Image (spheres, helix red, strand yellow):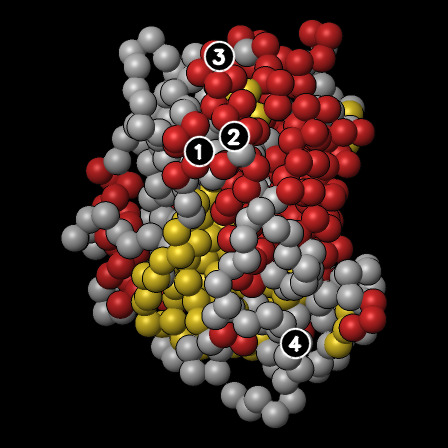
Amino acid sequence: MRLSKMCVPSSRSSDVDPVSEDRIPTRKPSWRIMTAIAMTAGLAACSSDKSENLGQIGAVSGFLGGVVADEPRAVRVARDVLSAGGTAADAAVALYATMTVTKSSVAGIGGGGVCVVHMRSAKKVEVLDFWPRSGTRTAADQTATTIPAVPRGLYALSARYGRLNWAQLLSAAEQYARLGVPVSRSMVVDIDANRDRIEASPMLREVFMPGGNTLHVGDRIRSVNLGALLTSLRVKGPGEFYNGALGAQIAKAVENAGGTLTADDMRSYKPEWKSATEVKVGNETLYLAYPPRSSSGRSVIDQGTELGAILNRYLADIDAGDNAAQTNSGRSGFVVLDRAANAVVCTTTMNKPFGAALGADSFGLNLAAGDAAHAQTPLIGPALMVNPFVWEYYYGIAGTATPAGATKQIATLAEDLIGNGAAANISMNSDGNSSVNIVRCLGGVPPHPETCQFVADPVGGGMAGTQ
């Protein structure tokens, strides 16, 4: 495809090592479900930003990209970041941070995730793995908890591929936590489904059942302690959280609450940048966060394609897994695309809904569950497809990554990218909690943003945010 009409914004080089975290950087599914599809129309061939307005909503004119996620308010925050000239990485950081307040059943400061990241100017796709892992200490009389992975994970994404100031990206989440924010239908569904766990946890009960009252859609959810923690992260970065007195205080509070986190665990944790699993799809390449665990699979998809073969292997993983333990595993997925064809596709996790329901209460910090049955990496993680010759974006998909969600994602990939009834033999028994979110651009971005579809699965209760 011709590149002469591309408009690519200036940005920081991705080859530069991340700055110190103690210093703040400046800078068409085939199944029969209803889908919410927002299509960009009548877009200019190129968009632009006014550099003097960088960081202000409206700085970008023309196509700004879009966001699809399971929580509407977080989508709006991320869309505003794109409008202000932020990259897909900036928007993803702001989105995840907001979800720690508005959708904390599946995304928390004490949780983690994995992202497939495409940065067009760097001509690369890589995986940022900050999946929460258990600490070094185990005890039969303590609740298995994980090391908080989100602060360093998001900071790594911002430092390598961001354009806006780190503090700006956390400001909406901080404000929502401190002052309160209306509860979405998506969050109320999770609260109602996990009422027993919430009632049994004083920390969760205070936030999600204040005064013993059930929250309804539109009621305000508020956590002053979490707001204070977000303030610290916004002002100081994650260095104090992991290496300073704050980290030691958090570890001690978790230990006193019966968890297994230590100060050494906090200091030693680091997210990892990894190579993606690559699968050829015609002239394009599909990049996946994790390879299949199995070497062979059930051949329900045409083996004549490389993609068909690897999807069969993912299906075998589902057959072999402990599906009962992961029926509702406290996960969510989102896709962010910016105007320059940079994309971030992520799966978030607390390992089960509302995580361990234990953490550092005085800091508003709930940790992800650390028991082995729930702490596994996704059966199939987020994926995106680009043309590796001209680095145009075509497709991104992420979901809940439960067994039913993984099957749904595989069926979507098979139908969208292989077609010809490729998904016909895949059985999908939806558990009512499994969703997939998609951004597909059939003509490629750039140069054809008008072909983009932003698809939010209504099962997740989220939305698609474009301009």
Q: Nearer the viewer, residue 122 or 369?
A: 122
Q: Residue at x 54, y 53 (%)?
A: 20
Residues at marks 4 and 3 touching, judged by CB atoms closer than 8 Å: no
> Mark 3 belongs to which amino acid?
Ala
Marks 3 and 1, how far apart in space? 17 Å
Marks 2 and 4, how far apart in space? 36 Å
Q: Nearer the viewer, residue 353 or 444?
A: 353
Question: Which residue was labeled with disc 1?
Answer: 266
> Mark 2 belongs to which amino acid?
Gly
- Find residue 134 and report its image quarter: top left
Marks 1 and 4, how far apart in space? 35 Å
Question: Which residue was labeled with disc 4?
Answer: 10
Q: Disc 3 on helix, strand or loop?
A: helix
Question: Which residue was labeled with disc 3?
Answer: 257
Task: Give the x, y percent position of residue 353.
Answer: 50, 26
Instruction: Give neighbour class at mark 1: few <14, some 14-19, many 20+ (Cα, 10 Å).
Output: many
From where the camera sits, is residue 14 visible?
yes
Question: Which residue was labeled with disc 2?
Answer: 247
- Find residue 240 and report its image quarter: top right
